[in-house]
Image (cartoon, grey):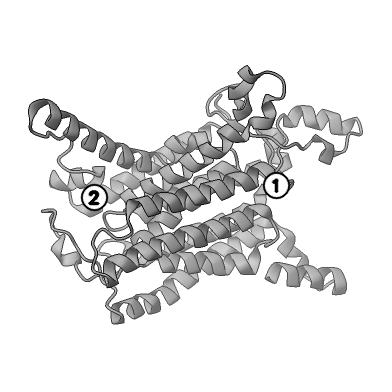
């Protein structure tokens, strides 16, 4: 909104300083500051409202130290993250940008699913919340929409070889003519690191590219479902999900900025994605919202994000990664989510296998997800969170190294 107002003032009246709103870096910095202020200032009011409405956490007895003290702590705090993200975005981003539209839709879609889940748990007194099948349907539905839009929209294009493109431009080839629809993605740490999903269907013969959606859209669905579930599982102790997510999102923000900037993408020789740089504004607001939320969610937490927050976080991270063609980097960027997911899968699978084979289920971990295993070993949750953050930072650095190390 403010972007369009200041753009008009700059063009119509040449107002001094109004032109600064055309710069993504300026609007991103402003979005970050504004989102932190909203999360910290109005977050307290939202927490008090949730407390007055008795929107408190119902804690299951798992035998974890300090667990019972958390009972009654306000949940649904993901509302703070959503509001602190969307308000700056509506004010500062280009709202007609296809990527911004997809991210806003993702936030509202996943936020609604998470809200319904939390509502059932709290007000219907059903600890299971929304049935798993309905969550999956919601995740698959979002993946189907996002995948279809990215595949069909004429506004979603890429320019693969930026060095070759520059040479062609110097020979009077229009830049727009170099942009193409593609289902290509990036394979990390590989020299020739572009892979087109359509190539999986090359055995079909001529015209196989027309059926690339058969691979691309299911891949989008898998990524969104996996990452949102990973974020959901990570949200188990104070500050863990918000902190690790902020690190992952900030990393993806750097990828987004260079992928959407023709100069940086040319220098790094990476895939240039026109108009994707605008997502940096959204990402800055999102990181600010997560950091602001940590003000109240760090140990001892005054509020929990609930599924309203965790499912939303996972969905946003997945869509950003897919949009900038870095979804194959997720196992590294979101390594904490992957570890939490795998710990549950391994625990459940091994328990069922040993029960069938020996008549008694056995466990790999003392408890899953992984952070509960360390709690069972006697580590204080603040120490677990801090060490998980450190691992997340190391993974982020390792991810950024992939820009040049290949």
Which quarter shows the N terminus? Answer: bottom right
The residue lying at 40 percent from left, 38 percent from top is 394
**Where residue 162 sits: x, y (%)?**
73, 32
Question: In front: 31, or 149?
Answer: 149
The answer to whether one can see residue 305 in this image is no
SS at circle 2: helix
Q: Which residue is mark 1?
A: 153
> Which mark is in front, 2 or 1?
1
- Total of numbered circles in the picture? 2
The residue lying at 42 percent from left, 38 percent from top is 395
Q: Which residue is mark 2?
A: 383
Q: Is residue 70 above or below residue 46?
A: above
Question: In front: 371, or 105?
Answer: 105
Which quarter shows the C terminus? Answer: top right
Horizontal side of 215 relative to 23 (left or right) equals left
Quadrant of the rendered image containing residue 304: bottom left
Number of other residues with Cα within 10 Å of mark 2, as a class: few under 14, some 14 to 19, many 20 or more: few
**Where residue 228 sits: x, y (%)?**
42, 49
The residue lying at 12 percent from left, 33 percent from top is 362
**Where residue 124 sits: x, y (%)?**
27, 70
**Where residue 329 sits: x, y (%)?**
49, 35
């Amino acid at each position: 909104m403010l972007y369009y107002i200041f753009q008009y003032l700059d063009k119509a009246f040449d107002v001094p300083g109004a032109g600064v709103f055309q710069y993504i870096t300026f609007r991103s910095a402003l979005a970050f500051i504004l989102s932190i202020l909203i999360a910290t200032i109005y977050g307290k009011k939202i927490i008090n409202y949730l407390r007055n409405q008795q929107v408190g956490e119902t804690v299951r007895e798992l035998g974890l130290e300090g667990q019972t003290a958390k009972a009654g702590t306000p949940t649904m705090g993901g509302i703070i993250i959503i509001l602190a993200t969307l308000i700056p975005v509506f004010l500062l981003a280009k709202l007609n940008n296809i990527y911004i539209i997809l991210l806003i839709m993702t936030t509202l879609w996943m936020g609604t699913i998470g809200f319904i889940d939390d509502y059932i748990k709290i007000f219907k007194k059903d600890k299971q919340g929304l049935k798993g099948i309905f969550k999956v349907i919601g995740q698959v539905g979002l993946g189907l929409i996002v995948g279809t839009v990215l595949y069909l929209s004429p506004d979603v294009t890429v320019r693969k070889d930026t060095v070759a493109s520059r040479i062609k431009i110097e020979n009077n080839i229009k830049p727009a003519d170099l942009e193409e629809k593609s289902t290509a993605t990036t394979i990390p740490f590989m020299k020739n690191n572009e892979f087109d999903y359509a190539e999986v269907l090359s055995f079909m013969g001529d015209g196989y590219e027309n059926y690339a959606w058969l691979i691309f859209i299911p891949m989008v669905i898998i990524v969104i479902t996996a990452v949102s579930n990973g974020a959901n599982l990570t949200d188990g102790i104070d500050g863990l999900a918000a902190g690790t997510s902020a690190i992952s999102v900030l990393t993806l923000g750097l990828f987004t900025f260079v992928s959407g900037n023709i100069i940086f993408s040319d220098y790094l020789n990476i895939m240039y994605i026109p108009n994707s740089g605008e997502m940096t504004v959204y990402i800055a607001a999102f990181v600010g919202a997560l950091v602001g939320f940590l003000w109240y969610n760090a140990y001892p937490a005054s509020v929990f994000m609930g599924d309203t927050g965790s499912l939303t976080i996972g969905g946003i991270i997945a869509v950003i990664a897919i949009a900038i063609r870095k979804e194959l980097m997720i196992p590294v960027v979101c390594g904490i989510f992957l570890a939490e997911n795998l710990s549950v899968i391994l625990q459940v699978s091994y328990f069922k296998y040993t029960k069938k084979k020996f008549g008694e289920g056995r466990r790999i971990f003392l408890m899953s997800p992984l952070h509960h295993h360390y709690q069972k070993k006697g580590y204080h949750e603040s120490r677990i969170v801090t060490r998980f953050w450190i691992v997340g930072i190391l993974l982020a650095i390792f991810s950024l190294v992939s820009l040049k190390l290949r």
